[in-house]
Amino acid sequence: MATAIRRPVRTPALRIERLSKTFGATKALDDVTIAFDRGQTHALVGSNGSGKSTLIKTLAGYHRPDPGAHAYFAGEEFDLEAPGDERPAGLRFIHQDLGLVLELSAVDNFGLKCGFSTSRGFVSWREQARRTREAIARFDLGLDVHAPLSQATPVERTIVAIAAAIQDWDEDGGLLVLDEPTAALPPVEVTELFAILDEVKAAGATIVYVSHRLDEIFQICSDVSVLRAGRLVASRAVEGLEPQDIAALMVGTDVDTEIRPTRPAAQRTDLALEARGLRGEFLRGVDLQVGHGEIVGVAGLLGSGREELPYVVAGARADIASGRLRVGDGEWSRVESGGFRHPIVPADRLREGIVGEMTIEENLALPVLSELGRGGLLRRGAERDVARESIRRVDLVPPEPDRVISTLSGGNQQKVVVARWLTEQRPLLILAEPTAGVDIAARMALFRLLIAEADRGLGVLVSSSDVDDLLHLCTRVLVLRDGVVARELAYDEITETNLLHAMEGIDS
Amino acid sequence: MSTTPTADPVQPQRSADPQASSREQAPARGSRAGALFGSALSPRRIGAVYVWAVIVLFFAIYTPDTFLTGTTVTQILNNSAITGLAALALLIPLATRTFDLSIGFVMSLSGVTAANFVANGMPLVPAVLLGLGAALVVGVINATVVVVMRVDSFIGTLATGSIIASFITMVTNEQDITDVRLTGAFSDLGQTDIGGVTLPVLYALAVVIVLWVLLEHTTTGRRLYSTGFNPDAAKLASVRVDRLRFLSLLASAFIAGVAGIALAATLGAGSPSAGQSYLLPAFAAAFLGATQIRPGRFNAIGTVIAVLVLTTGTTGLALALAPAWAADLFTGVVLIAALTLTGAERRRLRSRGSAFLRLRKRGGSTPDTPEVAS
């Protein structure tokens, strides 16, 4: 719970006025004026697409704001439009990926971040190691500063990043921004990180804490600001708030009822997918069923198992996952046997989805090559037929099978990846992050396509961090928390508020 | 080749949809240019043929008496055969983005092995088979090291090459294997000529046809390319990536074995070091070939064109009595020039792609995409 906080005269360590940022037609930030008081831990929350990452990145100089914004650090104005290396010295950032080179040691990473100590052009490793040890000494970290950071635990890495970021700053006036530092941390290590943050704050620094996890905000933050659709909707003390209040601020008015699909309930006796006891890196025993014609969503925060579930079901994690599953009325198979494979529309389209150098047609044919061969030779006519049929089915515009796929827009690429699995007569389609990097028009087309396919009897399992996907598509959503199904929402229950409450573990 | 004819019938459909053509304008322009230049004679697809013409023209003017003869043609073909076989050996692994740097040593090994057995009185056929067998053993070792033991192919096949070299030295004591028996049927394998064209040219031609069909017209070929372009996506599309990379290293060893025996037969001797010098020209030809016919893909006919360009240059230089260093200089310069042009072309394509990404990002509805877990 909120610790008792001394409230001296509140002077802002950082004040931002009238900050807007436009990407094309989208206003990612809309006239945001916000102040972070000195010596406080200030939470910045908002759902996906609310603009909090844009705010942090604009502040760090990664994005250039729209003209007209002002920013003051310790009362002195600085230029937000200037590049990142011209920020005030007291302003420090820990980005989500920490910016460390894991193959190198703590000493090396310190050198890279804060400069190497040299004498006559040579690195003085002894001095460098001493400085590194000194910087992390206050955090009481039993870390071998010469070992590669890949051997350190996630929280140790986070602490090294923090130590490097705040080295040689004037703590009394400094401001440290942490972008979702706990996203990749197991619960035990989160406590350790909070102790470190207390330590930093005790010296008089200000902390801006970006997080998806509302429970953390109540543990360590004194103030909270909520962004929604690029606007600042609240900025106030945490004291007196309940998690539900913050959730309500993040969601706004419920408008979701209008877009919820009105499809009839699927026949649960006639299953496209049945899975029992799925376990993996994050999953700790998940059972699930997808009926024919049903679109089942999977929601959850980062680390809840939401990202992992579709891959486990697709048999792509046979090395670490276990459990039993069967598709349609087929045989049960064990995930860990490695023998089970099911197509998936992967989360990272460029890395796992498409073969960028190949044409649309070649991408479409890839998974069905064995059916397109006769005596090993590729039947070009049959391949062209498959491509034409798929292109027609997903309504790809322009319908040019010979175009190299990397020249298409993200939405069209995604259509090809989806179409690829529709060419086969399979009862089940698995998707992860189906609309990542897909523009709004293509997104709607994709939704229509999936719903049409479901109406024809296809079972669909869709895991997404984007609540919009789930609202538009699903008649049932499994909400994962800490690797288990924390709640199952159906029909009217599927609202942004309910999803958020279930993901965060707020009783409603 | 097979991709162009259908581009045109589709064109009217696209322009019938104004919204679509504006949305996809950047790539559409590209494909229209592609339709214009996509014909078989486009410099983008057979640029090396034009370079070849320039080289021929140059020597025809510079040394007309020696260059413009019928024997020059057969000489170039004969000189190309072994390099061609070596370059073709590289194609299958390269299609899967796997390097086989051991082919030079494999060539020496198979040649020495076959020559050694023939010199010791073994009949021709089993001796040749043993030579090829030795090459295949290396292929299995390479594949095991690279695919099973997960050593990077670049350094892994270099290491196995070193081991082969030591083995060859151990057996031959760095002496050429020469014997009167090698001048009979064995050397006929490399020296018999039909109208001036020697047998290795025919071997190379056979391998070209097999590889072209394999890579271009079979399902396996398509899977090999997908493995090279994006192994993760290929895996998720149920392509057995590791198995293909394993087999590709067997294929390269086998073809290199053929090349080695052809080389030994041409020399009429088993040379413990003759194969190594083919490694660099082979890579040069394979990479230059990947810029031809099917740009971006290692392919057999492109490789043939590349080998002919390089050999025409070196043969012309020899006929013009150029100093010995000129040939290597020529190979190096042509290779850098070709790869620079391809690199520029690829960057041009990619920047078009990324300009598109930027467009999408600006118009996109998810400015916060980094929050999406991947």
Image: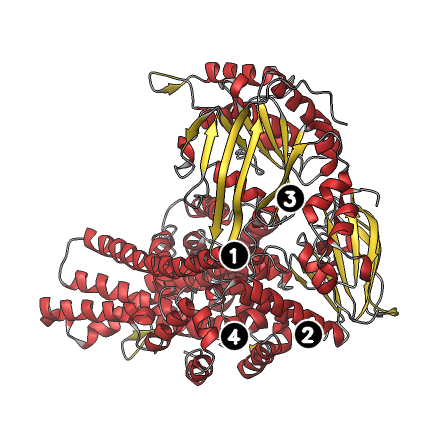
Q: Residues within 10 Å of mark 3 (few under 14, many from 20)?
A: many
The residue under label 2 is A424
- Dot 2 or dot 4: first in sequence order is 4
The residue furthest right is A269
The kind of residue on which mark 4 rests is Val
* Residue B282 versus residue A448 in the image, above or below: above
- Between A219 and A287, the residue placed more toward the observer is A219
Q: What element carries label 4?
A: loop
What is the distance, in whole Å, between disc 2 and disc 3 at their CAs?
A: 40 Å
Tag in front: 2 or 4: 4
Are the two marked residues, 4 and 3, in contact with CB atoms closer than 8 angstroms? no
The kind of residue on which mark 3 rests is Gly
On residue A397, which mark appears? 4
Asked if badges 3 and 1 are on one and the same chain, I answer no
Q: Mark 1 lies on which chain?
A: B
- Between A244 and A138, the residue placed more toward the observer is A244
Q: Quadrant of residue B37?
A: bottom left
The residue under label 1 is B134
